[in-house]
Image: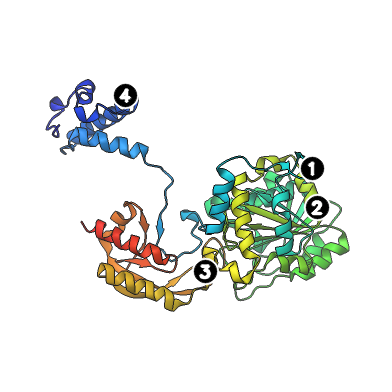
Amino acid sequence: MPGPRSLRDLPSVDRLLADERLADEPHDLVLGAARSVLERAREEIRVGREPSPLVDAVLEELARGRRPSLRRVLNATGVLVHTNLGRAPLADAALARVAEVGSGYSNLEYDLERGQRGSRQDHLRSLLRRLTGAEAALVVNNNAAAVLLALAALAEGREVVVSRGELIEIGDGFRIPDVLARSGARLVEVGTTNRTRASDYERAIGPETAILLRVHQSNFRVVGFSEQPRLDELAELARKHDVPLVDDLGSGALAAVGDETTPAESLRAGADLVCFSGDKLLGGPQAGIVVGRTKLVERLRRHPLQRALRADKLTLAALEGTLSLALSPETRDRIPVLRMLHEPVEQVRARAERLAELVGGEVEETVARVGGGALPLAELQSAACAVEEELAEPLRLGNPPVIAVVRDGRTLLDCRALSDDEVDEVAAAVAAARQ
């Protein structure tokens, strides 16, 4: 059915549905698609445009409705832990655990040895204790939830002392003062934006003090005339006044990465509880992890909010697969984020050169970023394949979508976060975008 030239030429819904190409489509679906197409056609005619052939448009509408909304994309931005693109890609071992556990039933909350109800928190406790040196561990659905649970369980109705330089806001309006308010705790600010000393904390501690809280500065750093107390200084102060010290590490690096503090280092310095993410520098699924003293972790586990924030079986399975790789330096680079982070720039450049050869582009030296609120000042040498600026949109709308960076009149396909296998996919996507 050709495109109509006027409103009078538009067919009825029934006439449109009578086309034989739509005969085998489910009635309810094709009816809704036909109505949408006709409404768009009316709008296009009113503004002087000629609509596309109507049956083709209905078929495209049906295809669009069946296409999954959550899709795999190729990350050519040079940002490794890209929050908008799902943060850390999972390791093969993590995906294998998800497939095994998710394809049938599991012992999520069943103790096989005793033959009775168990706890989902049991499955990762041993791994997390080995990796961090903690007495106990707990997993919830993200790090914001971990911090919220710690504050609610330990400080509801009481005071939490935090440096003004750590009252951060990260993506999507997440603010530490708001989390404190939702937990029922009361915020006590100490120090200034750029300088806070242990003495500032000590002056603020009183009968209502429940926690000393240290917060990772996430995606910014204060440089120059600045000062923050060392963690061991805060730990000594917390022990002196018999209040817990909670350290929110944010990004969750289990091994040394830049200047990020690891959970093991935090605990050794004297923190009582440490909270961190599973899906940033740890390289696993979205999760929030709490490690520390058994007595305090148990209070979090027994708090009513814990059930609302707990992780599901697929998250636990993926996290178990990731943590198993993190146990050994020999297997750690099988975690994609860590491999990309440590990969020599010569290998990245080789990918860019191969891509440039495949698509007729040019290799350009670039700077990649860690992303995800981790190491905001770190710059990773990288390389990109530069192609025409006008390809950025069709690449983004392609299948699979390729997300790139437009700069200086060109589309840059940064190869730091692309795997060797994905280079061929990007090349095919560029060829399709040029058609």
Work out how far the residue at label 1 is from the one at label 3, CA to CA, in angstroms.
Answer: 40 Å
Count neighbours of disc 3 (C-alpha within 10 A) and say few if under 14, some if 14 to 19, many if 20 or more: some
Residue at 13% x, 30% y is 6
Work out how far the residue at label 2 is from the one at label 1, CA to CA, in angstroms.
Answer: 26 Å
Side of 422 relative to 315 (left or right) = left
The disc placed on residue 27 is 4
Work out how far the residue at label 3 is from the one at label 2, CA to CA, in angstroms.
Answer: 35 Å
Count neighbours of disc 4 (C-alpha within 10 A) and say few if under 14, some if 14 to 19, many if 20 or more: few
Q: Mark 2 points at which residue?
A: 296
Comparing labels 3 and 2, the label whose residue is closer to the camera: 3
Residue closer to the observer: 124 or 203: 124
What is the secondary structure assignment of the residue under circle 3? Answer: helix
Task: Name the residue at the bottom extreme.
Answer: 346
Side of 66 relative to 139 (left or right) = left
Q: Report the colour scheme.
A: rainbow
State which tag comes first along the sequence, 1 or 4.
4
Side of 116 relative to 19 (left or right) = right
Task: Confirm or deny contact between disc 2 and disc 1 (CB under 8 A).
Answer: no
Task: Confirm or deny contact between disc 4 and disc 3 (CB under 8 A).
Answer: no
Q: Name the residue under label 1.
A: 114
Task: Say which quarter of the image contains residue 396.
Answer: bottom left
User: Type of residue at label 3?
Assistant: Arg
The disc placed on residue 147 is none
Q: Name the residue under label 3.
A: 339
Comparing labels 2 and 4, the label whose residue is closer to the camera: 4
User: Type of residue at label 2?
Assistant: Leu
